[in-house]
Image (cartoon, grey):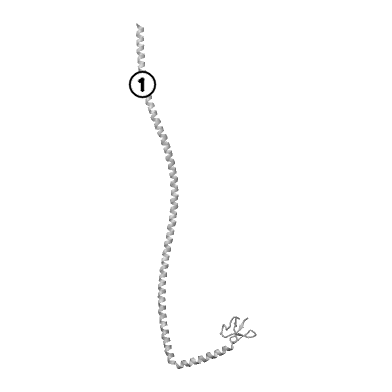
Amino acid sequence: MIHICNSCGKKNSEDNSFCAYCGHTLILDKEGRAKENGGSSKILAVFIVALLIGYGSVWVYHPYVESVRDESVGLANRMNADNLLTISNLENQLATNTDEFNQLLLEQQSLQEQISALEANQQLIEKSNEDLLYDKNKLMGEKRILEKQVNDAGEWNTSLNEQVVAYKEYEQYYDLYNNLQVEYDELETIVLALYVELEVCAAGVVSR
């Protein structure tokens, strides 16, 4: 249920005991409309009397009020001076912090440039590693080819050594053959000489 304040006419929630706009006490009547509490008028009257008494006291204690006001003004001036000093210090600190922040930004930019350079170097190193791996595989292939050629050369060398040994044996046999041929020629010469002498002897026997 909505309560309407009798003082200002504003609508208030049913949970409110006081007007949320003017502060007056809300009391529901039978029709659900808020009405002012009778005690609030008494409180207001007491407040007015107290205000008048206080106002009269101010005039009675005017010199004391003046001194209090002077102290208040002095205190306010000191507070203003302190505030100005604090503001100045804060502005200086802010300027210092701004300079430090700018310096940090420059250092961050420098570090970022160094990181970019390192990343570029890393990419170059990775590319170099790929090239080295390619060269390594290529050299390994050439190594296998050379090993095969060495093996083939070893086999060919073995075959050549066998041929050399065979040729030396052939030379030995050839020298032996030549020696036998010489001996055969000498024997043939001796045989021919003997045959001639035999014919001479035979002819002499026949002539007799």
State left or right for residue 186 relative to residue 62.
left
Kindly identify the residue that appears in the image at 41 percent across and 81 percent down. 82
Q: Position of residue 23 (x, y in %)?
A: 56, 85
> Residue at horizontal 43%, vertical 39%?
151
Vertical position of residue 90 compared to residue 180: above or below? below
Question: Circle 1: is it few (<14), some (14-19), or many (20+) Cα within 10 Å?
Answer: few
Q: Nearer the viewer, residue 15 or 117?
A: 15
Quadrant housing residue 105: bottom left
Residue 70 vertical position relative to residue 109 in the rendered view, above or below? below
Farthest residue in the right direction? 31
Task: Read off the residue under disc 1.
Answer: 183
Q: Depth check: give the residue in front, 162 or 30.
A: 30
* Quadrant housing the C terminus: top left
x, y (%) of residue 173?
A: 39, 26
In the rendered image, the residue lying farthest to the front is: 39
Task: Identify the residue shown where x is 43% and y is 91%.
Answer: 64
| Image-based side of 50 in relation to 165, left or right | right
The foreground one among 197 and 18 is: 18
Determine the image quadrant of residue 174.
top left
> Looking at the rendering, which quadrant does residue 38 occupy?
bottom right
At horizontal 57% and vertical 88% (from top left) the residue drawn is 39
The amino acid type found where label 1 is placed reads: Glu
Residue 183 % position (x, y)? 36, 21
Q: Secondary structure at mark 1?
A: helix
Would residue 39 be found to the left or right of residue 176 on screen?
A: right
